[in-house]
Image (cartoon, rainbow, N blue to C red):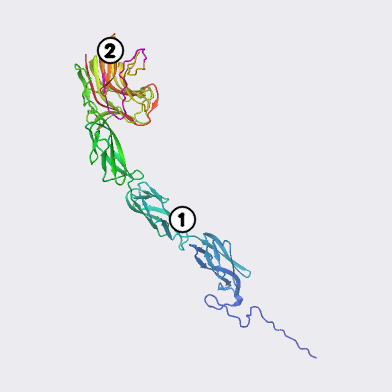
């Protein structure tokens, strides 16, 4: 019996699509052979950059085919993010920016995983400056402006750099930190900007307001009959000067000094007058004016009638009537000058001045400041007249010696045993005029307690040289007969006799009995180191010298 052979037909199941399954297409709509899908997940774009908090971007996941086509995965994508403070992602692959920084977003389909980088920055879009307006009422006053930079979605950008500038720095200046300083009346725009963003401005108005009035005057000391002009200056809260109108002037002591509606003051009598200036805007101010007697205008009230003028100097020029400098070449000390001083009592406005600069150190020969002399004459008896003023801040030398003039006889080349005139006093203490011998066994002084030679010094009391005021000094010296003690010294300050000393050997034994040299030779101190704390001066007006043989 013959057997039947069975044939088995193989069935290819692999790759057969189920009956009724949908046909897959790629992005172009081209049908994709299901058997060609590799199953590799790819998420596009590979990197996402967002420039504002709240910005979004959608991720596109797909499976790659062997031919390079992309096919949407059949199942849902599982999304995750490494740093949700930077960005988040929802189930549809929509990424949202939450904060600046960088994070990684991963997508998973089955066993396939892919990831992309997300970078979040904040790009400046606009600047808001505050306040919108600001008003400054005093020059030099300041205000602090603030500025905030925002991205395109209105989220502030922390630490964003802001640049500041003023449209008119003559009105208002601004520094890199946004601090504004008032410089002049008016209005300026302060601009705040950031790179790539729209700028913002603050309107700054500078309107200085008067808060007080201040009187300015050329001098606080007047002479009877003198006229000076006062001025009223307005001040804001920081003291900056401002113009002011409608000032009312009043003298509280019209018997001493009167003032007209324009602030012109006339000295009427000796004393002190208070002048007030009042304005409706603000508080008043008061100036105190001291009226001194009218100067002698060159009179030599205590000059003996038989004396003959030897020289006179008004300081109208550097070299006058034979006056020279110590070395005779006309070299000029840097401390000496001829200046204008409208309060000068005799020589119009020109006076000689010795200026000691702040920091000047005085000790020994370094104390000498100038030596301006008149030589080439001869007289046994001399009369000297001059006016002197020490600055308001004059600092008396620590030794108490503030020398002014030297008078020498003809021994030792005209440098023998000089007599010197000085203002005695230290620091800010009172200054008193006296006359001394340079190298004697005894001193000539108007101090009753100074008893170096065991004799009582005849004195008429001390006369203070008030700082900042002119004083008239007169000195009469009668030289002694050589070898005898019959010399005399007399001195007056402002016409009042302060010293009379007789029975003194004044001229040196080697002298022929005459004087021959008068020197304005100011010396600040001696063997005692003192430093000048401020710049100060000594002024001399109208030197007059007479004598007789």
Report x, y in % for residue 23.
Answer: 58, 80
User: Few, some or many C-alpha atoms within 10 Å of disc 1 (few <14, some 14-19, many ≥20)?
Assistant: some
- Quarter holding the C terminus? top left
Can residue 334 be seen by looking at this rendering?
no
Judging by the rendered image, the residue that carries numbered circle 2 is 487
Is residue 483 covered in magenta?
no
Left or right of 151 in this view: 14: right
Vertical placement of 146 versus 32: above or below? above
Residue 142 in sight in this render: yes
- Part of the protein shown in magenta: 451-475
Place of residue 538 in the rendered image (x, y in percent of width and height, measured from the top left) = 30, 27
Q: Which mark is residue 160?
A: 1
Residue 431 vs residue 514, the one in the foreground: 431
* Residue in view at x 40 percent, y 53 percent: 164
Left or right of 4 in this view: 46: left
Q: Name the main secondary structure of what is drawn in magenta.
A: loop
- Residue at 26% x, 13% y is 479
Residue 285 vs 441, above or below: the answer is below
Q: How crowded is mark 2: few (under 14 residues within 10 Å), some or many (20 or more)?
A: some
Q: Where is residue 122 in the image (x, y as percent from the top left)?
A: 48, 60
- In this view, the residue in front, 236 or 422, is 236
| Mark toward the viewer: 1 or 2 | 2
Quadrant for residue 477, please give it.
top left
Give coordinates of residue 190: x percent, y percent.
37, 54
Q: In which quarter of the image is residue 453?
A: top left
- Element at label 2: strand
In the displayed structure, 270 sits above or below 527; it is below
């Amino acid at each position: 019996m013959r057997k039947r052979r069975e044939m088995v037909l193989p069935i290819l199941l692999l790759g057969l699509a189920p009956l009724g399954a949908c046909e897959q297409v790629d992005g172009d709509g081209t049908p994709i052979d299901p058997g060609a899908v590799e199953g590799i997940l790819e998420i596009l774009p590979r990197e996402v950059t967002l420039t504002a908090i709240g910005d979004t971007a959608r991720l596109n996941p797909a499976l790659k085919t062997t031919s390079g086509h992309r096919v949407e995965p059949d199942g849902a994508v599982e999304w995750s993010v490494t740093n949700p403070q930077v960005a988040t992602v929802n189930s549809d692959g929509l990424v949202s920016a939450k904060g600046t920084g960088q994070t990684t977003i991963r997508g998973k389909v089955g066993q396939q995983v892919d990831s992309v980088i997300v970078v979040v920055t904040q790009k400046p879009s606009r600047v808001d400056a505050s306040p919108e307006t600001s008003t400054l009422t005093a020059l030099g006053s300041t205000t602090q402006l603030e500025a905030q930079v925002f991205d395109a979605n209105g989220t502030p950008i922390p630490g964003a750099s802001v640049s500041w500038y003023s449209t008119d720095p003559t009105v208002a200046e601004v520094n890199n930190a946004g601090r504004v300083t008032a410089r002049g009346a008016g209005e300026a725009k302060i601009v705040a900007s950031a790179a790539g963003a729209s700028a913002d401005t603050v309107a700054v108005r500078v309107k200085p307001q008067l808060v007080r009035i201040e009187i300015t005057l050329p001098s606080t000391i007047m002479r009877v009959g003198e006229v000076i002009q006062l001025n009223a200056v307005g001040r804001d809260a920081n003291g900056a000067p401002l113009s002011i109108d409608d000032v009312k002037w009043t003298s509280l002591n019209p018997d001493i000094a009167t003032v007209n509606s324009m602030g012109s003051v006339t000295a009427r009598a000796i004393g002190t007058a208070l002048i007030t200036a009042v304005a409706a805007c603000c508080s008043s101010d008061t100036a105190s004016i001291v009226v001194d007697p009218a100067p002698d205008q060159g009179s030599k009230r205590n000059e003996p009638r038989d004396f003959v003028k030897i020289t006179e100097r008004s300081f109208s020029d550097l070299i006058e009537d034979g006056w020279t400098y110590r070395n005779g070449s006309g070299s000029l000390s840097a401390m000496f000058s001829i200046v204008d001083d409208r309060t000068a009592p005799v020589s119009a406005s020109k006076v000689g001045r010795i200026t000691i600069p702040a920091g000047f150190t005085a000790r020994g020969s370094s104390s000498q400041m100038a030596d301006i002399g008149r030589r080439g004459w001869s007289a046994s008896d001399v009369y000297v007249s001059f006016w002197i003023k020490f600055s308001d801040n004059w600092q008396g030398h620590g030794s108490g010696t503030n020398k002014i003039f030297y008078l020498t006889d003809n021994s030792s080349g005209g440098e023998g045993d000089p007599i010197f005139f000085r203002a005695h006093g230290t620091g800010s203490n009172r200054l008193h005029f006296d006359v001394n011998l340079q190298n004697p066994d005894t001193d000539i002084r108007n101090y009753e307690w100074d008893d170096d030679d065991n004799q009582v010094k005849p004195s008429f009391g001390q006369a203070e040289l008030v700082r900042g005021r002119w004083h008239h000094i007169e000195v009469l010296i009668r030289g002694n007969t050589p070898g005898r003690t019959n010399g005399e010294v007399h001195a007056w300050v402002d016409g009042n006799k302060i010293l009379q000393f007789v029975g003194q050997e004044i001229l040196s034994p080697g002298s022929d009995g005459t004087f021959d040299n008068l020197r304005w030779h100011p010396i600040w101190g001696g063997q005692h180191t003192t430093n000048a704390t401020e710049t100060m001066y000594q002024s001399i007006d109208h030197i007059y010298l007479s004598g007789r043989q």
